[in-house]
Image (tube, helix red, strand yellow):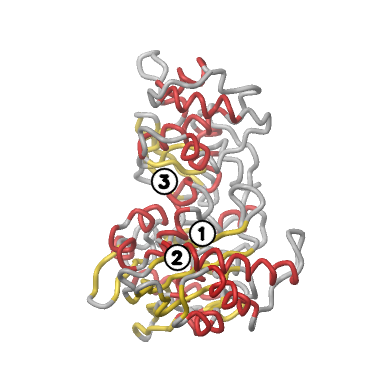
Amino acid sequence: MIPAQFDYLAPTSVEDALAALAEHGDDAKIIAGGQSLLPVLRMRLNAPEMVIDLGRIESLRGVRDDGDAIVIGAMTPHAVVGADPLVAEHAAVISRAVEHLADAQIRHRGTFGGALAHADPAGDLGAPALALGAEFVIQGPGGTRRVAADDFFVDLFETAIGEDEILTEVRIPKHTGWGAHYEKFVRVAHQWPIVAVAATVRVDGGTIAEARIGLTNMGSTPLRARGVEEALAGQPATEDAVRAAAARATEGTNPPSDLNGDADYRRHLATVITRRAVLAAAGG
Amino acid sequence: MTRISLTVDGARVSDDVEPRLLLVQYLRERLGKTGTVIGCDTSNCGACTVHLNGTSVKSCNVLAVQADGAEVTTIEGLATNGQLHPVQEAFRECHGLQCGFCTPGMIMQSVDLLNNNPKPTEEEIRLGLEGNLCRCTGYHNIVRAVQQASGQGAPA
């Protein structure tokens, strides 16, 4: 399968990329690592006239410490994020989610920002980003703005990034010392999760002081399980207490029905996977 | 057309290509590197795996223009002076193939895996090869081959 014809630009600065985007408007599509876009182009589900490649913009790569937050450049490959010591120390639930994202080849090529901007509700990074209260830094012709994770995911494959804007980096408030786990339910290797749960908890003397929970593939966007978070606060990190709190994982969800399972099946899974994720996060 | 220059299996190459040309097509159709095969064409099977600047990628999921300036190693560039790469040798020794179609990708991904983790456990090998499918389901001997190549003596 061969994509339809397109023109191609590989700017070396964000400013040049924004200029290209302004010039080509609706006809243009941004390519980051391309691991989701290229299959779409090959199947001709999308046929942009211009593809603007961010791969030559060095300033968009890397992870840095910025006081209360760590900052992940949008074009940082998954494999780099997964191996990064700052991420492991301050945002461990991202490390856990990246570990089993797609497969090794795709983790080498796919990027942190690309996956988030693609906003596939079955993608593995939205739930951790929500759970950690990430801020999305978006640059456009008018300058730079920050969008909270709660406002970033708008709908299926739709984010707050405007057509003339580019996601440049993601700021993650430090959750140093928090336990973390990403529990993913799949039937076969290298598949999108049927349901997955990102859990990060601050445990204090056997008690869950605070919990942050994100759900993957339980609606048209990744979702924050605030009911579970409330129910966990102050509870002992025991199987029974976590099971009771995890029952609230279905609140506010609207999971899809497809060949992998119907909505009720996913709701049930969400409670089970949430319990497992929280217990694993609290235990280690 | 876009001009690209890159190094493939140690040789400098330069060509005018359509931006939509996939790296795997460039390797096979322009350079005649048919050792790299197209399996699924949907970026699932990993048969087309090559190394791009030292790490494994699925070459059906990279544009040739994205490889401009890069160093690419294919299965054809692994052997040196007629001597098989240790991973190739181990696949031969352990019969790590049946029909052989997945083999170029399996070997390229195994080399990448061992570059990152020279002594992987069996589970780490299976996870590391998660993006490579063998439709003969000959996975056991593939895993043994990687164990042998890592100097961990494959169990019989």
Disc 2 to disc 1, C-alpha distance: 47 Å
- The quadrant of the image that shows the C terminus of chain A is bottom left
A44 on left or right of A127: right
Q: Residues within 10 Å of mark 1 (few under 14, many from 20)?
A: some
Check whether the beta carbons of the residues at disc 2 and disc 3 lie within 8 A of each other: no
Residue A199 is labelled as: none
Tag in front: 1 or 3: 3
- Between A83 and B78, the residue placed more toward the observer is A83
Position in image of residue A233 (x %, y %): 46, 82
The residue that appears at 40% across and 79% down in the rendered structure is A209
How many labels, in total? Answer: 3
Give the image quarter of residue B8.
Answer: top left
A146 on left or right of B106: left
Q: Residue B76, can we see it?
A: yes
Q: Residue B26, can we see it?
A: no
- Label 1, on which residue? A7
In which chain is the residue bearing label 1?
A
- Identify which amino acid the numbered label 1 is placed on: Asp
Same-chain status of marks 2 and 3: no
Disc 1 to disc 3, C-alpha distance: 16 Å
Position in image of residue A63 (x %, y %): 30, 64
Same-chain status of marks 2 and 1: yes
Residue B67 is labelled as: 3
Tag in front: 2 or 1: 2
- Label 2, on which residue? A281
In which chain is the residue bearing label 3?
B
Position in image of residue B155 (x %, y %): 50, 21
- Identify which amino acid the numbered label 3 is placed on: Ala
